[in-house]
Structures are given as C-alpha cells and as structure tokens.
Image: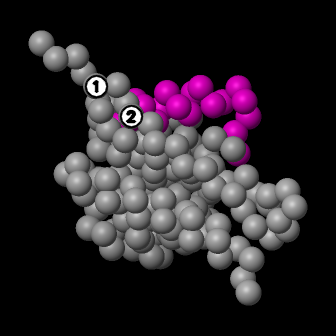
Amino acid sequence: MDMEQPAATNRDAERSRFISLLKAEGRHNVLEVDAGQGSDGVQFVRAGIHYTGVDPSEQNVHSARAKGLDVSVADARNLPFADGTFSAVWTTGTLLHRADTDIDAVLRELVRVTAPGAPIAVVLSSGEDEGHAGTQHHSFLLLRTPSLPTR
C-alpha cells in the first residue's frame, strides 16, 4: 500500500474542484506560482485552461518546459506580469516555503497579477502528519481578489 496516495488523491481532488470552478465561471487562464516540474500544469492544460507557470528553480522550469508547459524562472515576491493578467492563480506550498517576512509580499503579488474578483487557490502541504508516518496533510484555501467597485 502506498502511504502517500491519500495525500496525492486529496491534492488531485482539490485541483479538479478548482478546475471545475474555473470552467463554471468561464475563466480561461491560470497562473501557477512555484510550478515545480509541472505536474499540476499538465492537468490544467488537459482541462483546456491556458496555463502559465513560474518557479524559482531553473531545473524545475527545464523539467516543466520538457512537458510542453509555458513556465519561466521567477520569484513569487516579484512576478513578471502586469496587474490583473490572470483570471485565476493556483499555488501549492508557496507560503510554507517562505520566511514569515516574505508572506505579505507574496500575497500582494498574487492579488496584483489576478483579475478583480478572481479566485486564488492556495494548497498548503504540512509534510508528514503526526502519528501518520509517510502521509501528508493538504489544506485548500480559496481566496478571492477584491472586486472593482461598481458605479
């Protein structure tokens, strides 16, 4: 029995739920911050969603590009995109791997590059759960960027 399967299934289920939300809302593009080697990106593309990823590791970017993904080297504290470029953001582990002093800057950047009212999915992996060696716990947070005021 693969002890990591429950965690992967949980993350896969959350990603599928997010993809369903994007489709239901007519959102056609997503930015993944800290894209890793592109395993989530492949699933977004398979679902017909235009995918852009960034990762601080050149090695991860190379691996993701080998899968045909549009991924570039960038840091979450300084994303190379204009304000409101993306209709959604997906990120896993980004906030867990940052110093406390960087979290505000990362969150500001996620909101800045996301269109008003758009969803930002943050998946947090806690590593091994206490008392459950070899398993991970994933928490899924769905945030919304502030909507523009209506006149």
Relative to 87, say whether 18 is above or below: below
Answer yes or no: is residue 83 visible: yes
State how far apart marks 2 and 1 are (Cα).
Answer: 8 Å
Is residue 105 part of the magenta span, yes or no?
yes
x and y percent of residue 30 in the render?
A: 35, 52
x and y percent of residue 23 in the render?
A: 25, 57
Q: Residue furthest bottom?
A: 1
Seen at 19% across and 51% down, the residue is 26
Q: Which residues are magenta?
A: 97-114
Asked whether, in this view, residue 31 is left or right of residue 126, the answer is left
Residue type highlighted by circle 2: Arg
Q: Which residue is mark 2?
A: 144
x and y percent of residue 13 in the render?
A: 48, 65
Question: Which quarter of the rendered picture does the C terminus lie within?
Answer: top left
Residue toward you, 45 or 17? 17
Q: Which residue is mark 1?
A: 147
Pointer 1: residues within 10 angstroms few (<14), some, or many (20+)?
Answer: few
x and y percent of residue 47 in the render?
A: 30, 69
Seen at 61% across and 50% down, the residue is 139
Question: Which quarter of the rendered picture does the N terminus lie within?
Answer: bottom right
Whether pointer 2 and pointer 1 mark residues with C-beta atoms closer than 8 Å, the reply is yes
Q: Tell me which colouring the rendered structure shows.
A: one colour
Say which element carries label 1.
loop
Give the dominant element type of the magenta stretch: helix, strand or loop. Answer: helix
